[in-house]
């Protein structure tokens, strides 16, 4: 039977899986996955979100909190607040409801999160994204628009 550590590692490695998907990967019942994760959700080490499945019902998906990522990966993430959070907002404007952060890991991975959603790109995916963004900037400069 899979340990809680293997469940947590899988959540860090592949955020957004459902209990059924985690169970399939680790040969556990989805109810067993959910019960084992309860205290980690309460401690904010694991975050949940809802996703509609083909049947139309909603199921929970699991995402690692930053403290879990730090524990499992053993690396620190460089977190940058969004420009909106850095700039002083007028007194009559409420702050944004969800936080936007991103960070690079020492293994070349990139993590982007907003609210309870988090996406982690591998080193190769990060390099591909950066090449794409760089190409956009080059095109913008070349066209005289930047």
Image (cartoon, rainbow, N blue to C red):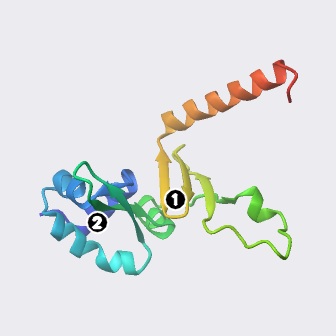
Q: Position of residue 66 (x, y in %)?
A: 51, 66
Q: Of circles 2 and 1, which is in front? A: 2
Depth order, front residue of 44/69 = 44
Q: Decide which of 139, 79 is in the foreground and name it.
A: 139
Q: Are marks 2 and 1 in contact (CB under 8 Å)?
A: no
Q: Secondary structure at mark 2?
A: helix
- Location of residue 83 by image quarter: bottom right
Within 10 Å of disc 1 (Cα), the crowding (few <14, some 14-19, many 20+) is few
Query: Which residue does the numbered mark 2 point to in the structure image?
Result: 5
Question: Looking at the image, which residue is at 63% across and 59% down?
Answer: 100
Residue depicted at x 64% and y 57% = 78
Distance from Cα at disc 2 to Cα at disc 1: 17 Å
Residue most extreme to the front: 56
Q: Which residue is mark 1?
A: 75
Q: Residue at x 64, y 59 (%)?
A: 79
x then y, percent, for residue 35: 22, 75
Q: Seen in the image, is 91 located left or right of residue 111?
A: right
Label 2 packing within 10 angstroms: few (<14), some (14-19), many (20+): few
In the rendered image, the quadrant that contains the C terminus is top right
The percent position of residue 112, horizontal first and vertical second, equals 56, 52
Q: Residue 37 has which mark?
A: none
Horizontal arrangement in the rendering, residue 44 relative to residue 89 (left or right): left
């Amino acid at each position: 039977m899979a340990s809680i550590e293997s469940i947590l590692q899988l959540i860090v490695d592949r955020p957004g899986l459902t209990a059924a998907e985690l169970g399939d990967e680790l040969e556990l019942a989805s109810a067993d996955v959910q019960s084992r994760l309860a205290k980690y959700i309460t401690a904010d080490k694991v975050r949940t979100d809802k996703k509609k499945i083909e049947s139309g019902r909603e199921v929970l998906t699991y995402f690692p909190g930053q403290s879990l990522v730090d524990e499992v990966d053993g690396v620190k993430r460089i977190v940058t607040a969004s420009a909106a959070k850095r700039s002083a907002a007028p007194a009559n404007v409420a702050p944004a409801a969800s936080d936007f952060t991103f960070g690079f890991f020492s293994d070349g991975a990139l993590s982007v999160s907003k609210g309870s959603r988090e996406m982690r790109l591998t080193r190769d995916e990060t390099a591909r994204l950066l090449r794409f963004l760089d190409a956009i900037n080059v095109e913008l400069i070349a066209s005289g628009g930047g």
